[in-house]
Structures are given as C-alpha cells and as structure tokens.
Amino acid sequence: MTSHRLQHIVPGFAIFVLASVVTWLSFTEQPAEAFLFPRVISVVFIILAIWNLIRAVTGMSKVGRGISVETLKNLAPGLAVMLLYVFFGAKHLGFYLGSTLAFFTIYSFYDPASWSSVKDWIKRALVTAAFMAVIYTLFAVVLQVHTPRGILF
Amino acid sequence: MEFLNYFGGVFEPWAFMLLLGGTIGGLILGATPGLSPTMAVALLIPFTFHMSATHGLVLLGAAYTSTVAGGAVSAILLKIPGAPANIATALDGNEMAKRGEGARALHLSFLSSGVGGVIGILLLIFLTPVLAQWVLKIQTPHVFWIAILGVTVIGSLDSKSFVKGLLSGCIGLWLSTIGYDEIQGTERFIFADALGGGIGIIPALIGLFAIPQVLDMMAKGRVDALVEALEVPRQKLAASMRELTKYGRALSIGTVVGSIIGLIPGVGGQIAGLVAYDQSRKMSPQREKYGTGHPEGLVAAESANNAMVGPSLVPLLTLSIPGSPTAAVLLGGLLIKEIFPGSDIFEKHPEVVWTFINSMLIGQVLMVIFGIMIAGWAAKIARAPAPIMAAGVLVLAVFGSYSVGQSVGDVHIMLALGIGMFVLEKFGFSAAPLVLGLILGPIAGDNFTQGMTLAAAQDGPWVYFFTGTLNIVLIALVVASIAYSFWHNMLAGDKSAAAEPVGREAK
C-alpha cells in the first residue's frame, strides 16, 4: 500500500467512524421525533462515508494533497501555541495578555529574520505592541467587549 | 423603481462612512495574498454585531465588492492573486506590469470591474423582486427541498470531488443539529458543555474560513516569501477609459458570463473569471496574444468576477441559496440580524435590503475611484509578512468569535472547527458546502419536522414531500446537480491527482 493511499484512508476511516456514531445515536436516542431530521441526514452521511472510504482503500480517491511530514514539522510549534493560547492562555492569563504572548510567539517563531539580532527582537516587540493596541482600541474601547480577566489584565 | 426611494439611506453620514471604510479596507484586504474575500467578510461580521442591520450590511456589502476587485492589485503587481477570483487576472495583468504597464493594467482592471459590477448590481435590483414574487408560491416541503438543493449544488459544484463535496455538506447539516432542540425540548449530540447552545454561525464561519488560512501560512515554515512589487509608472486615467471602449467584446463577454455564473448557486468568482477569460480568448481574433500581457484577457476576467457579485445575491435574498461562498457568509450576517431571506424580505425590511443593494451600487463607483487612487500603495501594504498575518488573523479570529456571544466556548468551537477544516481541505474537502449545510440545516430541519407533522394529518409524507409540480422540479434539480457533478468527475477522471500528489505540497 502506498503512502499516498494511506494518507486518504486515515481521514476516510475517521469520517466513516464519525458517520457511524452519528447514525447510531440518531437511531437510538429518544425522543425519536427529535431525531427525525438527523436520521435522514445520517443515512445519506453513512452512505457517502462508506463510498468515500471504498474510494480511499481502492486508491481511487486522489483529490487533495494530503499532509506531508515537513508540513507537520512546520505546523507543530504554531499549533501548540494556538492550542495553549485558546484553551489556557486566553482564559487564565486574560484575553489581552494571552493574545499578546500568542502574537509575539507566533510572529517571532515564523519570522525569517535573525533570532540573534537585537534589532529584530525590538521590531517584533513593537509590531506586537502596535497590533495589540489596535485590538484593544477596537474591542475594549469601541465595541466594549468584556473579555475574561487574567493575572494581569 | 422602488429602490430609488432608498438611495438617501446610503448617503446618511454613518452609512456612507462605513461604505467608504469598507471599500478602502476591502481593497487593501483583497490585495493581501492569503486573505480571501470570504475570510475578510467572515472576520468583519462580529464588528457589525453592534450596528443596525442596515449599517452592518452596508459594511459587509462594501467589503464583498471591494475585496474581489482588490485581489487584482496583487495579481497584477505581485503575480499572486489576492483571491481565487483573480487567478485569470494574473495571467495577462502581470505580464503587462512587467512591461512597465502596471498603471494601465490597474486602470483597465478597476474600470472593467466597475462596469461589470454595476451591471451585476442592476441585475440584482431588477431580478430579485421578480423572483421574490415567484417565491410566494413556495410552501413547507418546497423550502425543505430548496435548502437541500442549496447544499447539493454547492457540494457538487464547489468541490473537485463530488463525494467529498456532498460529504462536507452532510457534515455541515449534522453540525447544525447539535444543541438543544426547541421543538421537542431535548438535547442532541451534546458531547461537551461548549456545545450546549449549538454551534453558532459566526464562530463557525470564522473558524472554517480563517483558521485554515492561518495554518496554511504556518505550514510554509520560516520562509521569506516577500515578493517585490513591480513599479507603477503614472498613466492618464482618461487614456485608460478611452482604451476600455476598444475592448467592448471582452467587456461584454466578461459581464455576461459573470452575471450568469453569479446566478448559479455555489459557483463563485473563481470560475467566473476563468470561464470569461477562456470564452473571450476563443472569440478573439488575437487569441494568440492571451497570456502574453493582452489587455483583453484582463478586462474579461475582471469584469466577470465583479459582475458575479450582484447576481450571486439574487438566489440568496429570495431562496436563501447563496451564489458564492462569500454570499454564504453574508447569509450568516443576515440571519444574525434576524432578517430571513424569502418572498417577503422586500415587504418586511425594504429599508434594510434596498439600502444594502443601493450601497453596493454606489460602492462600485467608489471602488473604481479609490482602487485607482490607492492601488500602488495597497500593493505595498499587501506585502505584510506572512508571520504577522498568521498571528494577526488568529488573534482577530479569537476576539471576533468571542465577542458575538461573549463565550469562551464559542472560541473553542471556532478553533476546533478551523483545525478540522484545515485537515479536511488537505484531503480535498471544501469549506463552502460545510458552511452552507450549517446555515441551511436549521431551515431544512424545521421545515422537515413541520412537514412531517402536517403530512401525518394529510396524505402522508410521500405525497407531501414527493408529489406536486414544484416538489418534482426541485427534486429533479437536486438529482441533476448531483448527476452533473458525478458525470463531470467521471470525465475528468481525477485529473487533478497528477498535479496534486499526496503529501508533497510543502516540498
């Protein structure tokens, strides 16, 4: 089995599992009246999921580039910051502090400029401060959105 | 001519400021590679939450119009289409810019966008009320079939693989059923506390359109992807206007093709530009010049992708079926303002709808004026480095999705959907059908449940849902949309596979 085919089988199988769970719940949960529409959807969903899985297993599913190891390596740090930011930082550190840290970390990590140049670090800090000032003005001052407060603000 | 009565609303100071700001901002966002019009409009929706329905729609309409046109700037000066709709523009536009004719290309691009756009909006003005009258005949089972048709058309036509397109639509429909069912008073598919209130349209739209683009930028790693913008020497606008009259054929082809494609639900601007470019090339006596910097190609592509904007709102305002993915986001913007498209939209909300449409007409003129004024400058701003863009869009997405319901749960849903969509997109799934399933799901679901109750008291579900001329026509259209896509897929034979080997995109 080629790695290309395997790349399509994994999401194909995941969608099949999701469709199976949806179908199972739609036909077993009560009251039945509440699940009438989900039942109709789930029948079409499971048929298409099986069709998609068969196409993946037989090598007929070719649309889509898949995800390369290199892509995963590039993504991993940014994705980790993203998850930490949304599921921990924004709530516990506060939206503005969490966002400032997330912006600065992601910008600094993916910035092709040198990591050893003080000038570049100052530039990153200034860009982050300027961007967060715009966000604060927009959401806190103009739209008056009350965000969760953290350890600082 | 009812629309004439509502022109005053566009020139009300706050509305006009929003129109102006939306147009200029949209031009810059559109010129920024990586920021699609759909994502720009989705990110703007939270800002409209605190505005009146009219003002919110004026801003979204201006952004929709100008992001499509602004995409031409980076297509011409950087050879990076600002949006998928501008792919065909880059073919000749960049060649012209390389020859030192950047200003000429930009002038022709904005002028032809303006002509196409104005004709498209006029079609919207005159066709929508006619279609709205016809919609009066529509009843519960028809609404159900129309909602399903919306999902199948976009699922079939907007995806390279029709199985995956329809699967995306199914996932969207299922997602729409998550939450508390108010009719039966019961919970459905609530696997986590954050899902208790269901999946909000705005967090979902932001997640599905913005997060995959953030991840795409990160996936490229620490690459210096800055491209030098070509210089734009000055050129007299009057000369460009005179020149445009020479390309009447390309302008007509672009406008007609764009308008027709806009009316077809789900097809969108990318196809409009490419089809118009191809048709114009075939009908041109100078077809060999296409691709070498021939203004005709540029004019055809740009007039088409802006002519598509107005007609794409015709099925949206009357049938709740968007003509393009961006129109699907606009539908979300309408629904959160509790404006439900349909036959009575012009009776219930004439001031909102007509002011919105009129603002898009005025917006076309502003787009041409400001587009020409700031094009060269916008191209420089548009070169904002990808790491800043990725971090900035992420923070905006978090604040935008939180601000709608002031709920951290919405932010979690937004991110989960965004990461899921990024993975799905890598395997050929598309966001547009999923979004449409999510938006049209409640409409289909409520009408299905209502229809089943009425059918039980009459002749049963079979007669209620599957008989009657309109039911049969709609079912035939659902089947035809799937069959056409299936046939097209079989003919194409997954040709894209050769060009898109799995797992190699980053190399």
Image (cartoon, coloured by chain):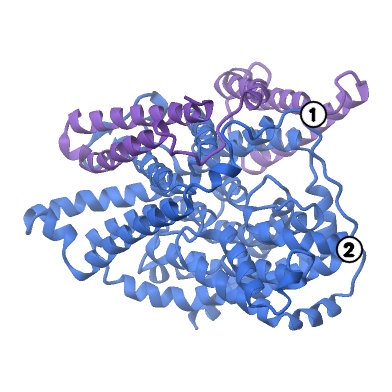
Chain colours: A purple, B blue
Callout 1 secondary element: loop
Q: Which residue is mark 1?
A: A111
From this view, report whether residue B429 is shown above or below residue B280: above
| Amino acid type, residue under disc 2 in the picture | Arg
Q: Which residue is mark 2?
A: B99
| Amino acid type, residue under disc 1 in the picture | Asp
Indicate the chain on which mark 1 is placed.
Answer: A
From this view, report whether residue B258 is shown above or below residue A75: below
Callout 2 secondary element: loop
Marks 2 and 1: which is nearer the front? 2
Image quadrant containing the C terminus of chain B = top right
Discs 2 and 1 share one subunit:
no
Q: Position of residue B400 (x, y in %)?
A: 58, 39
Mark 2 residue crowding within 10 angstroms, few (<14) / some (14–19) / many (20+): few
Residue B363 visible within the image: no
* Residue found at x 53% / y 48%: B495
Indicate the chain on which mark 2 is placed.
Answer: B
Residue A65 placement: quadrant: top right
Please state if B213 lies on the left or on the right of A31 as rendered.
right
Q: Position of residue B129 (x, y in %)?
A: 42, 75
**Residue B56: which disc?**
none
Mark 1 residue crowding within 10 angstroms, few (<14) / some (14–19) / many (20+): many
* Residue found at x 54% / y 59%: B268
- Mark 2 and mark 1: span between their CA atoms? 32 Å
In depth, the one of B463 and B14 nearer the eye is B463
Residue A52 visible within the image: yes
